[in-house]
Structures are given as C-alpha cells and as structure tokens.
Image (cartoon, rainbow, N blue to C red):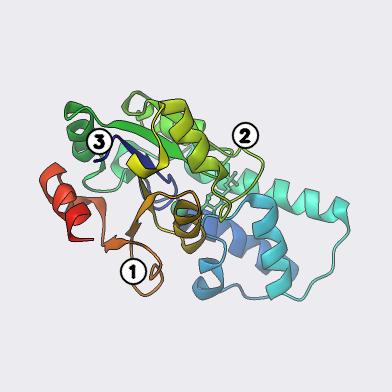
C-alpha cells in the first residue's frame, strides 16, 4: 500500500518544460544551430550542467569551462525571466485536487526535482503548502537517472521505497524511480515512458480511486 507520492516538478506539476525548451533553443540559436523539440526530449529531467553538455553535443560545439559556465548562467537568466511571470493558471490540470485528496487519505506528498529553481516556482504558484517535503537540485548531487533525489524524499517522509510512488514525465526520471525500487507512474506519452509501471496522460486523469485501481492493475 502507498504511503508516499513523490512528484517530479517540471512537466508533471507545472508546464515549465516549454520554458526550459525556449531558453535552451535561444542559446542554440545564439551559438548558430537549430535545437529541435526532439533533441529537447533528452534534456528532460536532466540537470542544468548535463543539459548544456547534451546541447553542445547536438550542436557539435567545443567549449571551455568558462564558456560553459557563462552559457548555463545565461540560459538560467532567460528561464527565470519566464518563470517569474508564471501564474497559478500554469499549474497543470488535476494537480491541486489530487494533492489535496492524497493528503486527506493520509498519503504524504513530496517534490523530487533536479531543478535548482524548484522553491521559486512552487512559491510563485502558491503550491509550497501542498508538499510535506521538497527535495530539489540544491539538495542532491547525483542527477536522475540516479535515484538519489527520490530516495532522499522518501527518507525525509520516513517511508520505504516499496511504499512510495513516483510521478515523472522524463525517461531519466522513470529510470531513477525504478532504480530506487519505487513504483513509477509515467505522465505523458507511453512511447517515451515505456519503462514506467503505468502511464497516464496527465494528473487530470486521476483521482484517489482511479489511482488505487492503477496500482492494482500492475
Ligand atoms: C528539471 C527539468 C530539466 C532541467 C532541470 C534543472 O529536471 O526537467 O529540464 O534542466 O530540472 O533545472 P534548473 O531549474 O536547475 O535549471
Ligand atoms: Mg520533468
């Protein structure tokens, strides 16, 4: 039985994935190459530094550590510009009612995100109080697909992995959840998230009852 639900942030709770993409694409343009949405799939769930490395690989660009630092910094400035303009209307459909219902049923909730901007985003959207723990990119060193972020979240909640469920939109995140011994719910396309235990289109498809059915189907 489930005692904790751990949510990825970008692409699961809020639609920031599009802002990450816009900011990375702007950097690619500045460096003189095209960065497609398909390329962008590889950046989902991946840390900022690692994302930059993948982007530079796509563009076939060699860079010094100083250049890399500057570009990662520029990208984040552009990204933060977008997210500080966000409002609660960008919380993805179904998120708030589902979080409320989980807690009513005694299930703990946490964020497990690679982002160093997680607190900024959650406070902008008024979501801080919906989570019992927030583990983000400032608190962990190993990026997904390493399970560290989810294992840390479960630890803070005092719940063992086999009683924890992870919600993720990124392949690296699903791999992280499975490596941590947790049940993985993919949020998005079942082609991309084939390694998940189950895949849903969005949290709007779920309420507590349907969630319990999903877990039993598996
Ligand atoms: C999430 C997103 C990634 C992003 C990473 C770091 O995992 O899915 O696309 O690169 O967080 O985010 P940050 O806000 O720290 O740059
Ligand atoms: Mg994500």
Would you say 12 lies left or right of 149 here?
A: left
Work out whether residue 153 or residue 182 is closer to the camera in this orientation and state it. Answer: 182
Would you say 159 lies left or right of 217 here?
A: right
Q: Are marks 1 and 3 in contact (CB under 8 Å)?
A: no
Measuring 26% from the left and 31% from the top, which residue is drawn there? 107
Circle 2: element type: loop
Q: Are marks 2 and 1 in contact (CB under 8 Å)?
A: no
Measuring 79% from the left and 71% from the top, which residue is drawn there? 61
Q: Separation of disc 2 and disc 1 at Cα?
A: 29 Å
Q: Which disc, if any, is residue 138?
A: 2
Q: Give the crowd class for mark 3: few <14, some 14-19, many >=20 residues within 10 Å.
A: many
Q: Earlier in the sequence, mark 1 or mark 3?
A: 3
Residue 144 percent coordinates (x, y): 56, 52
Work out whether residue 189 or residue 156 is closer to the camera in this orientation and state it. Answer: 156
Q: Quadrant of the C terminus?
A: bottom left
Work out whether residue 55 or residue 132 is closer to the camera in this orientation and state it. Answer: 132
Q: Quadrant of residue 89?
A: top left
Q: Is residue 61 above or below residue 134?
A: below
Mark 1 near ligand 2 (CB under 8 Å)? no
Circle 1: element type: loop
Q: Give the crowd class for mark 1: few <14, some 14-19, many >=20 residues within 10 Å.
A: some
Q: Quadrant of the N terminus?
A: top left
Q: Separation of disc 3 and disc 2 at Cα?
A: 24 Å
Residue 164 seen: no
Measuring 21% from the left and 34% from the top, which residue is drawn there? 102
Residue at the disc numbered 3? 99
Q: Which disc, if any, is residue 189?
A: 1
């Amino acid at each position: 039985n489930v005692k904790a639900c751990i949510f990825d942030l970008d692409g699961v709770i809020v639609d920031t994935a599009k802002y990450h993409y816009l900011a990375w694409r702007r950097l690619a343009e500045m460096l003189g190459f095209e960065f497609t949405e398909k390329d962008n799939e590889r950046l989902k769930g991946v840390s900022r530094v690692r994302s930059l490395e993948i982007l530079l690989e796509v563009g076939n660009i060699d860079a010094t550590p100083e250049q890399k630092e500057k570009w990662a910094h520029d990208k984040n400035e552009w990204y933060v510009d977008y997210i500080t303009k966000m409002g609660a209307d960008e919380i993805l459909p179904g998120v708030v009612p589902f979080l409320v219902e989980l807690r009513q049923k005694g299930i703990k909730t946490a964020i497990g995100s690679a982002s160093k901007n997680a607190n900024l985003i959650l406070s902008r959207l008024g979501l801080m109080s919906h989570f019992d723990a927030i583990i983000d990119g400032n608190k962990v060193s190993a990026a997904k697909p390493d399970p560290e972020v989810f294992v840390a979240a479960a630890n803070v909640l005092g719940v063992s992995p086999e009683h924890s469920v992870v919600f993720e939109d990124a392949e690296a995140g699903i791999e992280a959840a499975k490596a941590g011994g947790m049940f993985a719910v993919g949020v998005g396309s079942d082609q991309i998230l084939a390694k998940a235990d189950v895949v849903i289109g969005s949290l709007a498809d779920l309420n507590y009852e349907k969630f319990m059915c999903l877990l039993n189907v598996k």
